[in-house]
Amino acid sequence: MALAILVVLVVVLAVIVAVQFYAYRARSANLKHIRNQLNSIITEGTNEKLLVFTSDQALIPVLIEMNRLLEDNQQRAADFMKMEQAMRKMISNISHDLKTPLTVVLGYLETLHLHPDTSEEERKTLQGKVYAKANEVLELIHKFFDLARLESGDKRIELSPVDINEVSRKNILAFYDTLTAKGFKVLIEIPDNPLLVWGNEEALERILNNLISNAIQHGGEGKTLGLTLRADDDFVYMEVWDRGKGISELHQERVFERMYTLEDSRNKFFQGSGLGLTITKRLVEAQEGVIRIHSKPYEQTVFTVQLKRLSFSK
């Protein structure tokens, strides 16, 4: 009897050892396969995932987390490449936007230098053009500087309650002469009851200035510009719209990118650095807001700024 029990125990132990040995070999084979796959993925820079068929319950969660790590690394690499491409394009655009007015300035100066007998009236005209182009370069440099400060966090936007009705009225009135001279029809919808937002008055003025200037510059064919202010219980919505040729759906998600300009925005009718809307977006986000665009060519292109609404204290 004792001998039979001993035999059974030996058999059981042997089976256990055999099973453990098989599991050890299977795990070793899997680990070797994982190592080879990882080496291949890292060396070749592919977007593959670890694929291992196993019933090892201890290994499965490790594989899941390793694949998550690979996905994160691949996403970071893709983002880095996208950023590099954007940076190269931005540098190219910066060079273009600085070179163009500087070339014009040099041309005017060369004319003045080579033709000392130029009449006083012509000289003053050329000097005025040089001054205007120099200011254009300076304004562009200021935009680069402002955007760099906003994105680095060096430019702090102090938030406080702001009467958005008054800000809106003041800024649309500042464009009255320009809009009248260009023959624009202006439609303003600002409610009588004051709306209070959590924001920064200076930043809001710049946002409106950028959006109205953008509508005049790129929506001029429609000869209509609108400013609408509306609200619900939680948010205030400030809309600047026009009826120009609009922005195709393909470009709508990219208009807020640094230095992104539409194809025709670099001809003499649609000049622009591609920084105004980027700065606008950063200023909106610094006030805990959101900016959106919706466009139907020659019907309505609208930029909507959503800001947190505050209640007036009684």
Image (tube, rainbow, N blue to C red):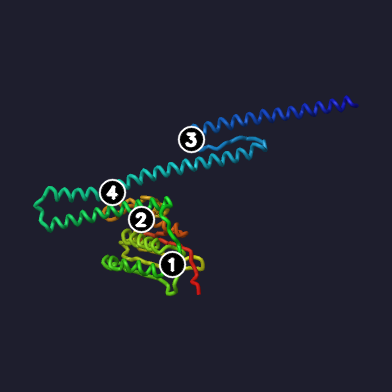
Which of discs 1 and 2 lies nearer the camera? The answer is: 1
Please report contact status of discs 1 and 2: CB closer than 8 Å, yes or no: no
Q: Which of the labelled discs sits on residue 267, or is there none?
A: none
Packing grade of label 4 (10 A; few <14, some 14-19, many >=20) is: some
Q: Residue 30's quadrant in the figure? A: top right
Q: Residues within 10 Å of mark 3 (few under 14, many from 20)?
A: few
Amino acid beneath label 1: Val
Q: Residue furthest left?
A: 117
Disc 3 marks a residue whose amino acid type is: Gly
Disc 1 to disc 2, how far (Cα)?
23 Å
Residue type at mark 4: give it.
Answer: Leu
Sequence order check, earlier mark of 2 and 3: 3
Could you say which disc has been placed on residue 98 in the image? 4
Side of 239 relative to 34 (left or right): left
Identify the image quadrant of residue 283.
Answer: bottom left
Q: Earlier in the sequence, mark 4 or mark 3?
A: 3
Q: Is residue 154 above or below residue 167?
A: above
Residue that numbered label 3 is attached to: 45
Q: Gap between marks 4 and 1, in whole Å?
A: 37 Å
Residue 23 drawn above or below residue 298: above
Residue shown at the point (28%, 68%) measured from the top left? 177
Tell me if label 4 and label 1 are in contact, CB under 8 Å: no
Helix, strand or loop for disc 1:
strand
From this viewpoint, is residue 32 visible?
yes
The residue singled out by tag 1 in the image is 162
2 and 3 marks in contact (CB < 8 Å): no
Left or right placement of residue 37 versus residue 107 in this view: right
Is the residue marked by circle 1 packed among few (<14), some (14-19), or many (20+) residues within 10 Å? some
The image quadrant where one finds the N terminus is top right
Q: Which residue is mark 2?
A: 276
Left or right of residue 56, residue 223 in this image = left
